[in-house]
Image: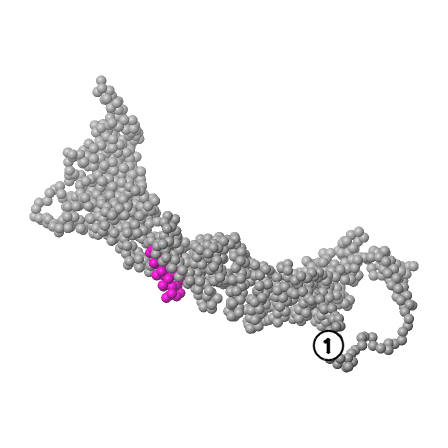
Amino acid sequence: MATVASSSPRTEFFKQLKVICVPLSQLILRAQDLASDAKETRRLLDSLLNTWTAQVSKDASILDENLAAYVFFPLSHLLRKQDKYSVLVIEAVIRLLRTLIQDGWKAKIELDLSQQLLLFLSFTIGGAPGQTERRELPEETIIEGYRTLTALISTMGLALALPAAPRLDNQIIPALGHGVTVMLDSITVGVPPLIQLEALRCLQAVFIEIHDNGLLAQFLPGTVSCLSKILSPPQQQKTQKRVLIGALGVLGVVLTTSIADIKVRGLLKKLETGSEVEKDPSAPEDDENKLRIELSPSWLKATTAQVKIALSAVLKLRNHESEEVQSALDKLCIALLDECHASLADCQGILVESAMMLEEEESTRSTLETSLQDLVSIYPELGGSVKSALFNWVTGLPRVMQSNDERVKQLAVRNVLRGSKHAASLHLDSSTLDDSLGDALRDSVVALMKGSRTPRVQEGEGTDVILSAASGMERAESGMDAYRPIILDLQAQKSTRTGIMTLISNISSPTQQVKLATTMLAYIQDSDGVDQVASYWLAFELLKSSYARSSDLEELFDLSSLDETKGQEQAFQELYDFSASVLSSHSDPEDVDWRLEAIALEVSAFASSRLKSDFRAELVDVLYPVATFLGSQTPQLRSHAITTLNVIAASCGYGSVSELIVDNADYMVNSVSLRLNTFDISPASTKVLTMLIRLTGPRLVPFLDDVIAAIFAALDNYHGYPVFVQNLFAVLSEVVSQSVKSDTLLIEDANFKTVDHKKRSLPRLGIAGILTTLQKRSDRARKTAKEQDDETPKSHPREPWGPEKPQAKSLLDALENPEEDEEKPEPPPEEAKPPSTPSYTLLTRILSLTQHYLTSPTPTLRKSLLDLVGTVSPALAPDENAFLPLVNAVWPVTITRLQDPEPFVAIAACKALAALCSAAGDFLTSRFKTEWYDSLSKWLARVKRDAEKTRGKQASSGGRVGQMSGAVASSLPSRSEILIPGRQKNEADGLLVRSSGAVALPESSAGGGLGKFALASQVWDAAVELLKAIVSFVRVEDEMFDEILGLLGDVIMRDREVRETLEAVNADAVWLVLWERGAVGPRKGTPLVDGVVFAGGTSGTS
């Protein structure tokens, strides 16, 4: 029962096959019309394939070689007529054959059948040898053919591995050789990638499953040649990544199965002993060995030589962009170094070098995989190859750094880095290698600096831009990472720069880094130019890296007592001393590479980050030189200076850079004062002083008396240098700007009232006020008359009114008896004037000094001095006894600046005079009166004419405005209906209908030119402000007021502020001018007198 039960599933499956195989056999053997039967044939084949596949999924144990032979019977007849069937039928047959081979015949397939299937599949895929016309097959059919061929070769390998299996005979070897040829042809470039991958799998199966070394040696040259062709340039660039990875894997299998040490160990021994059995040429050759290569030492030697050539081309893939390709190549190198260590001894150099370049990081490598370090521990001779490869990379690094290809540079740096790690992990110490590494690093950095594009220096940025950046640096980053790169600062060079920094940070040990840095410090003293910058930068980076690595160890161990730490501190102290000297010599006229100074700034910042609050003692020597770089013409240095100040402030415990500078202002002021006293003055010094004053504010000004005195001395000695004088006055201007903000600027212990010279209109008294005034006048008159009536008339005086003068005798008595004079009471002493504050004294000296430089040939200096006068005048005004003499001193040179040829200087002069008017008031009455009739009125009239011409207006005649013209006049109503501005009964402003031929055009209607933006218009606007200040603060005569009113007649119609200013002095005159221009109507309540006509009214009768 068990037998029946066990054979029941197989019987049922056989019945299923029979139902399909019998009709299929009949259909094929009938051979009537194959084209019409193709559809039915394909249906039966698909049904047969599905039935077989279903059984494989269900229970493959019942399948055997007998069932496979039964199914193959109809297929064998079909294969005889394969050329007459369609491609789809052939593809279905190939797919069915693969399942029969894998699940039916398995290891029991006969070699004759294998030979037939090999030929069938080879001819189907690649065509028969000598065939001129080849049948075109779709990609899917070829792929199925290779998959079936792979299954067939694997099955053959299983069959040949059986104990009683026969050896491959001369009949199957040609078929297998043709199959390998077809595979190699499908691997070449131009074939679809899927076909290439299947051909590679099939070729790999040949070398894995066939264990006949002589036969594999026959296939080895062609296989290696074909694989190296697609793996080496230029074809590797046309090959897909997955094909390259597959080809590398197949190449490793081919070499390790053909010439592995275990396969050719006998030949290796013969090569070592030099004994090789020569073959007798007269001996008959065995037929079975005709198609095989005889393995001999000479063959092995020739083969390894050819393999080395192929590998030298294949290993160029180590520079491939794909990490997967690099990983596959790394596995190939490790496999060959491990399994072909002796047979490929000549290739050890290039294999070790490639393995060092390609080895993955330790974090990504599996512990089960063999690494290069493992192989070096097994084969010590590989350590020499590691050192040799590293030495070649190090010595060739400077040459590679001259390349224009950034990727090549990055690969070279990465190679040196990985080689250094291998040498360190394998403890391969070499003094020659260490010396060459330091020289190579320096030469490489020099090559990079010379080859990189020099950054364009942007010059001409002013102090305000620098100071605004300085005031905003409190919010900037305060770490060492905030610095911009000094070398390789382009975005395209970022990866190269990162690689160089990583190399510096990881080469050798901290002790070796300190030694290299010490060597670089020696180069600094003996070199200049780019070589000095490169050595300086390398020394700093090496020491910085050694500190970073040492700090990690100090967290676990106390290394302070070791000599290594002392050497590190000595090296850094030498580096810091050199940096301090570079910073202090910044103001020297020598042309210094800006990168040298930038590195010095970074060294100072790094020193502060290490010493923290202890670095405050170094601020005496460092702070001022660092601050001078804020005035540098190089943007990179300005940025470095800002970052350095941020780092120093944060490291020393200050909340901001402003706090740092204010707290150490005495150091900086002393430094500036020393330079000024020795006339060592540079633009940077003045800019730093300006920044210092701006940051500290008014509280520093009282302590600048020595500095200001030095500036005055410098002005006396260098008055012939306009730009230099302008820089010095920029400092004085900043002193003034900060001083006027002080709350204690005025006289000490004195209370002065606020100065206000503004003229205000008299209040309206009304009827009650008029009656009160008349009553006061009447009382005063009666009092005067009564005093005259009570007074008795006296004759003319007969003796002197004053006290009697001492005679000569009286004088002699006073000299002989001084005691008598002492007894007489002395007159009371005059009240002493309170002392002035230092800030007030400085401002008076500065204002007094401006008069000597307002005639400077530099327009910008004249303008800045006039601005200074306008700024300082209101601050000095409360003490009239000290201020008015200064006004008298600066008046002549200030008033003449109105005639300056530069419009912006004239505008500044108007503003300065307006400020003097506000501060001095009626003191300037006689001066303006004199200037008015001499030249001021003429200048104002000329400025007004120029402005009117610029604005496209015609000069008015007889105090009347110009007539409208052209399109403007034609667009308005008739003359009797013109609307003009005026006053109505209940409105402050309004429109009245008036018959007039004179119409004032608004300013906005003026055409032509730049209008109010023209220089002439701006000068006139400044002149209007000056006239307004004169009328507001200075007492003017009526005639002068009338002329001013005539000049401003058009202005008061549109500017309410000017109008109110003039009305405060004489409202009636202003109204009359407005009435003449038709801007106001008749006044309310015009008196009516018989025979008299008032302005704006009509004649009346009594």
Q: Residues within 10 Å of mark 1 (few under 14, many from 20)?
A: few
Q: In the rendered structure, which amino acid carries the disc numbered 1?
A: Pro
Q: Is residue 800 left or right of residue 213?
A: right
Residue 620 forms part of the magenta stretch? no
Residue 631 vs 92, above or below: the answer is below
In this orientation, which residue lies closer to the viewer: 373 or 278?
Answer: 373
Who's the residue at 16% across and 38% down the image? 168
In this orientation, which residue lies closer to the viewer: 816 or 696?
Answer: 816
Residue 513 forms part of the magenta stretch? yes
Q: Is residue 990 left or right of residue 25?
A: right
**Which image quadrant is residue 196 in?**
top left
Who's the residue at 68% across and 66% down the image? 833
**Which image quadrant is residue 1030 in?**
bottom right
Residue segment shown in magenta: 511-537
| Residue 93 appearing in the image | no
Name the chief secondary structure element in magenta.
helix
Which residue carries the number 1 mark? 818
| Residue 590 appearing in the image | yes
**Which image quadrant is residue 1004 in?**
bottom right
